[in-house]
Amino acid sequence: MLTIDDGKFFKDGKRHRIWSGAIHYFRTLPEYWGDRLRKLKAAGFNTVETYTCWNLHEPRKGRFDFSGRLDIERFIDEAAQLGLDVILRPGPYICAEWDLGGLPAWLLRDGTVRLRCNDPVFVGHVRDYFRELFSRVGKRLACNGGNVIAVQVENEYGSYSNDKSYLAAVNGILDECGVDVLRFTSDGPDNWMLSGGAMDGVWKTLNFGSGAAGAFSSLDRFGEKMPKMCMEFWCGWFDHWGDVHHRQNKKFVKEIGYMLDHDINFNVYMFHGGTNFGFTAGANYAKKYQPTVTSYDYGALLTEWGDYTPNYHAVRKMLHDASGEPLGQLPPSPRLQDVGTVTLDEKGSLWDNLDVLGEEHFSPVPEPMEHYGQSSGLILYSVDVKGEYCRSFMTFDDLRDRGYLFVDGALHKTFDYRKSDAVSKLYGKPAAIIPPFSGVKRFDLLVDVMGHVNYGEHIKDRKGVSGMRLINQNLTNFKVTTLPLDDVSGVKYGGSERYPLFLRGKFRADNDGDCFVHMKGFGKGVVWVNGFNLGRYWEIGPQRALYLPGSLLKGDNEIVILELEKAKGSVVIDSRPDLG
């Protein structure tokens, strides 16, 4: 067990310092957990930190999943086998540039649940999740002889609110679950953040990416003699679509040296970032909506594919110098392979596969995606309008995130939640000019969801659309098709080549070499290899290639691409990463 005496850590009666690195088990395939953890150990770290992802562990209310890359028990056990301690950050909210900050989207279904406050309905859902989580993790807590030495209460709560009754409720649930280990909060070093997120009697840690020398003065007013710790020392940053690629923090190594010299405990965020596979990437919203890219490379000490960086070697030397331990031999770098050009010789329109991929709902009025029990993917709103109309306008309420309006089957306009065009600015919401018509006109609005907001006041981020009007008439009687795209194995190829378009190709590869799928010449879409969703791509960058772990490969392989806008007839798979 970890104990505290005179503001210092002790473990098994010996002076102890926490040198931790963050690895999110859900952002790395299980086949690579051992490799990443061994590299953490080889660098001189003694602890691994991870969030838990409520949205994947409970994708439907009461239906839990702790299998595959969600097998947190296996991840903790692999760390234990290497002699690594674990810091667990179960949230329930985690931010992490993860969809909805890790909260399950079914919380948004009826729009009445109040998130991250002492709403009894929300707290009840948290209790159900924590009971399931700690029924599995509990025996791995240090109080029960395991290697989980500390557990966080909520996450950066002072950046969001100051509801102490809610924090007390979360803390009380941990009591109910038998979490009798060191508990902590983590917040930014600003006074307003700490006053909102700190709790009496709970260890207070800080998050920052520079300024370690002055950061901890903000804790002085609490008058507690506790070990100093930076729970998130940011070694880099994450990327948004259409923005620049962020690289490693230039001040990082110097700041680590300062913390080592001044007996400050730290957790490097991220030691290994990994990947936002599938539709798991979140989004930020400050002045505008900013969706996060598929890669979570983060400028971490290990690259997205697990290779060493200059900062890894620099920090490794510093930690070994501080501990007096010899450097020893490093685990090998990952093997990369070149596959070459893969011809995409089969094509099938999304429109011809709605019956295979989607579920139809009759809806008197259009509702957000979550209303229909969907969390991610695409959603299609279809309505027939009959009458006599002059040149007019159509408007859309709460259109999120990227919309494609089809009129009688032809693409009429594309909307982007990140920005407004002149017509939309004129009407104060997404809008399109509709030519005059007489009789029946078919309107289809396909919405591509780019990730729920994961931080700040806009976190209650319902997707799809909540209303459509032609001039001032509310449109009604919709056929809504939910398209979560969980399984694309049944897609039919041949027939129409109308966009959105599925493209399929076959290729041979080794199963022990990682590679990258380059999307040059494509517009926007999603890639699956052997049924596994690698994630989103978008020509606006900065990311231009998707990481393909070798563990997903076999001798004969299948690649499927859903392209929403434009495509070419082949794709290149090789050993070159391209993050921008």
Image (cartoon, rainbow, N blue to C red):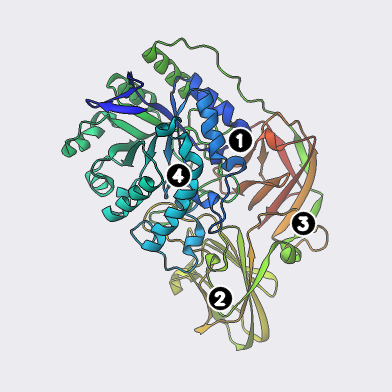
The CA distance from mark 2 to mark 4 is 39 Å
Q: Are marks 3 and 1 in contact (CB under 8 Å)?
A: no
Q: Which residue is mark 3?
A: 490
Q: Nearer the viewer, mark 2 or mark 3?
A: 3
Which tag is nearer the camera, tag 2 or tag 1? 1
Question: Looking at the image, which is closer to me, 523 or 11?
Answer: 11
- Residue under circle 1? 30
Which amino acid is tagged 2?
A: Ile
| Label whose residue precedes the other's in the sequence (2 or 3) | 2
Q: Kindly tell me whether residue 262 is visible in this rendering.
A: yes
Mark 2 closeness class: few <14, some 14–19, many ≥20 residues within 10 Å: some
Q: How many marks?
A: 4
Neighbourhood count class around disc 1 (C-alpha, 10 Å): few under 14, some 14–19, many 20 upward: some
Residue found at x 72% / y 54%: 488
Q: Residue at x 33, y 36 (%)?
A: 208
Q: Residue 262: image x %, image y %?
A: 27, 22
User: In the image, which is nearer the foreground, mark 2 or mark 4?
Assistant: 4
| Location of mark 2 (residue) | 433
Marking on residue 96 = 4
Whether residue 580 is visible, yes or no, is no
What's the CA distance linking mark 1 and mark 4? Answer: 20 Å
- Of marks 3 and 1, the one in the foreground: 1
Q: Residue at x 31, y 51 (%)?
A: 167
Residue 419 pos. (x, y %)? 47, 60
Cα distance, mark 2 to mark 1? Answer: 50 Å
Q: Residue furthest bottom?
A: 388
Assign a secondary structure to mark 3: loop
Which amino acid, mark 1? Pro
- 514 relative position to 368: left or right: right
